[in-house]
Amino acid sequence: MAFNPKSLANLDAGRAKGRKGVLNKTTASVKSALTEAFEQLGGVDALVRWGKSDPAAFYSIWSKMLPAEVRAEVNINDGLTAADRIEGIAALLRAVGKPVEGATDVEYQERT
């Protein structure tokens, strides 16, 4: 029988799907076992000792726990208009000897 790549897409079709966000039994039992082992190995105190003794390994693992992307909304309530901000940026660029190119305040306002 020849290989049919479309059959791969149908592998999950017959499997029962759980509720979204609910751990399956295997995942839950492994998580429980790891939590118990963590506590038996000394918990947070042991983790701190390990981090002090091998900071490179500790921070390597810790960095993988950080979110890949941070989303934030910044509101600036300084009373400046868009034109004021553009002129301020242009002044900074001129002060460091960089050419000032780009939109004027009129062009900026037309785009927004």
Image (tube, rainbow, N blue to C red):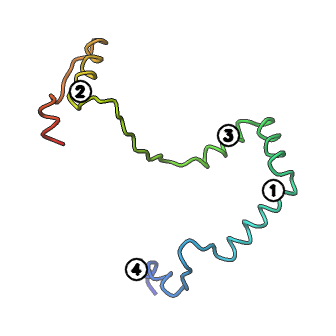
The image's mark for residue 99 is: none
Pointer 4 or 2: first along the chain: 4
The image's mark for residue 6 is: 4
The answer to which of 109 and 54 lies nearer the viewer is 109
Residue pointed to by mark 1: 38
Residue pointed to by mark 3: 59
Label 3 neighbour load within 10 Å: few <14, some 14-19, many 20+: few
Residue at 28% in and 18% down: 93
Cα distance, mark 4 to mark 2? 54 Å
Cα distance, mark 2 to mark 1? 54 Å
At mark 3, the secondary structure is helix
Taking the image as shown, residue 50 lies to the left or right of residue 91, namely: right
Marks 1 & 4, CB-CB < 8 Å contact: no
Callout 3, which amino acid? Tyr
At mark 1, the secondary structure is helix
Callout 2, which amino acid? Ile
